[in-house]
Image (cartoon, rainbow, N blue to C red):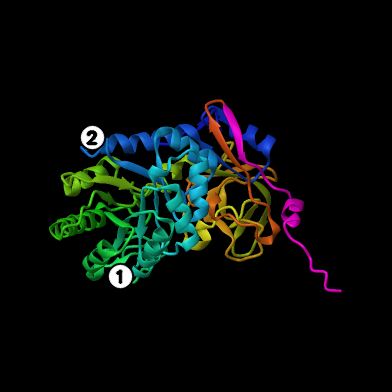
Amino acid sequence: MNHFEFRDGELYAENVAISKIAQEVGTPFYCYSTATLEHHYKVLAGALDSAGIAPSALLCFSVKANSNLAVLSTLAACGAGADIVSGGELKRALKAGIPAERIVFSGVGKTRIEMRQALEANIAQFNVESLSELHELSQTAEALGLTAPIAFRVNPDIDAGTHEKISTGKAEDKFGVAWDDVEHAYQLAADLPNIDVVGIDIHIGSQITNLDPFRKAFEKVAGLLAKLREQGHDIRNLDLGGGLGVPYQSSEDRPPSVDEYAQVIGDTLGASGCQIILEPGRMIAGNAGIIVTSVIREKRGQAKNFLIVDAAMTELMRPTLYGAFHEIQPIVQTDKNPALWDIVGPVCESGDFIGKERHLPTLEEGDLLAIFTSGAYAAVQGSTYNTRPLAPEVLVRDSAYFVARARPSVDDLLARETMPDWS
C-alpha cells in the first residue's frame, strides 16, 4: 500500500498535489509519504505479532535503503531500530533519535575507528563477518575497557533467486563466515577477551520474491542454534536480515505478503526462545517514495523515440546498475497521442536511462512525470556526476510537506573544492 493516488486526473501524495510541490521546490525531487512509512512498519510489526514473534522482536530499519534524517526520525517514533553499515550511518541513526540499544552494525568493512564509535555508543550488536574482524573488534574493545556483543553473520550458501548484484548468501558472495567454519568461529569468539557472543546473523539478499530461500536459510539457522547451545554458547538473538521484495510494476506477480513471511519465521524459529531481529529496508521505504521529474524535450530518432527528462542516473541508479524497472506515469493523466518512448536523462552516458520502451502520451516541455517505488535505494545512491546538484528530498504528512534535504547550488558544490597555489 502507498499513499500516492490520482484525484480528478492529478497525482497527490497524501493530501498534497505533486504539482504544487514541483512548482515551489523545482524538479527533480524525491517525495516521501509519512503515512506509507508508518503503515508499512506497523503492518510488519503486526504480522510478527500474529505469528507469535512480537513483542520481543526488534525491527532495525536498514539505513542504507533510505538514510534521510526525516525518514529515520519518522520510523524512530514508530519504535524502529537501525541496521547500519558505517560510522556515518551510526551518527545518522543516533541523531534521528534511534536509541543505541536498538542499533545493529553490519557490513564487511568496519574500521577500528567505526568499531570504537559503536562501542562507545553502546550499540546492541555487531554482526561480525570474518575472523580478522573479530580479532580487531576484541582488541578495540579491550583497549577501551568495553565489551562487544557479537553475532556472526553466517553464509548459508543459499541462492535467493534475486539479481546477482544484490545476492548476499551464496558461497561466492563477499558476505559472512563460510558455513563450514561457523562452529570454529564461535568457539574462538568465546575464548577472546571483551567479546560477548549473543547471537546468529544471516542475510541472503535483497528483493527476494519467493519464500523458499528464506525457509531454507531459517531452517539451517535453527539447526545451527541447537548445535551452538549444545556447545555451551548462550545465543539470545537471531538476526534474520531483510530482503523481502516489493512490487515494482503493477503487471508482475506480487511478492509474498508480510504475513506469509512472518509465518515462515514463526514456523522455523518461533520456538527458539531468542529475540528475533529483522533488518527491513525496501519493504518499508520502497513504495513510500517517488521521484518527480520534468520533461526537457522529446527527441524522435530513426530507431527510437526519446523523452529527455531532468532526472537521471544521478537520481536513480537502479535502472542503469541492475536493469531495474520502475513504473513511470505523467502527474496529470492524459491520453494525448500515445507512443513508445525511452525515458532518459541528460547525463552524458548511454547507460543513463530511467525506463525503456514505455507507452506514454506525447508530453511537452515542463510536463511532470512520477517515477514510482523510489523510496529505497534511490536518493542514497545519488551523485553529483556531471556537476549536477543532489536533488532535494521532501516529506509529506497529510496536507503539509517539508523539505528534508534542500537542493544545493552549483556554487555550494564548488565551494567544497580548492585549487593549489604552486607558483
55 or 121: nearer the eye? 121
Magenta includes 417?
yes
- Taking the image as drawn, is residue 358 in sight? no
Real-space Cα distance between discs 1 and 2? 34 Å
Magenta span: 400-423
Q: State the quadrant of the N terminus.
A: top left
Instruction: Decide: few, some or many residues near mark 1? Use Cα within 10 Å; few <14, some 14-19, many ≥20.
Output: some
- Taking the image as drawn, is residue 91 in sight? yes
Above or below 416: residue 329: above
**Residue at 40% of width from left, 58% of height from top?**
141
Q: Which residue is mark 2?
A: 50
**Tag 2's secondary structure?**
helix
Q: Position of residue 39 (x, y in %)?
A: 40, 33
**Residue at 57% of width from left, 51% of height from top?**
339
**Amino acid type for the residue under numbered disc 1:** Ala
Magenta includes 9?
no
Most distant residue in the left direction = 230
137 or 178: nearer the eye? 137
Q: Is residue 70 left or right of residue 250?
A: right
Q: Which residue is mark 1?
A: 171
**Tag 1's secondary structure?**
loop
Above or below 170: residue 389: above
Instruction: Decide: few, some or many residues near mark 2? Use Cα within 10 Å; few <14, some 14-19, many ≥20.
Output: some
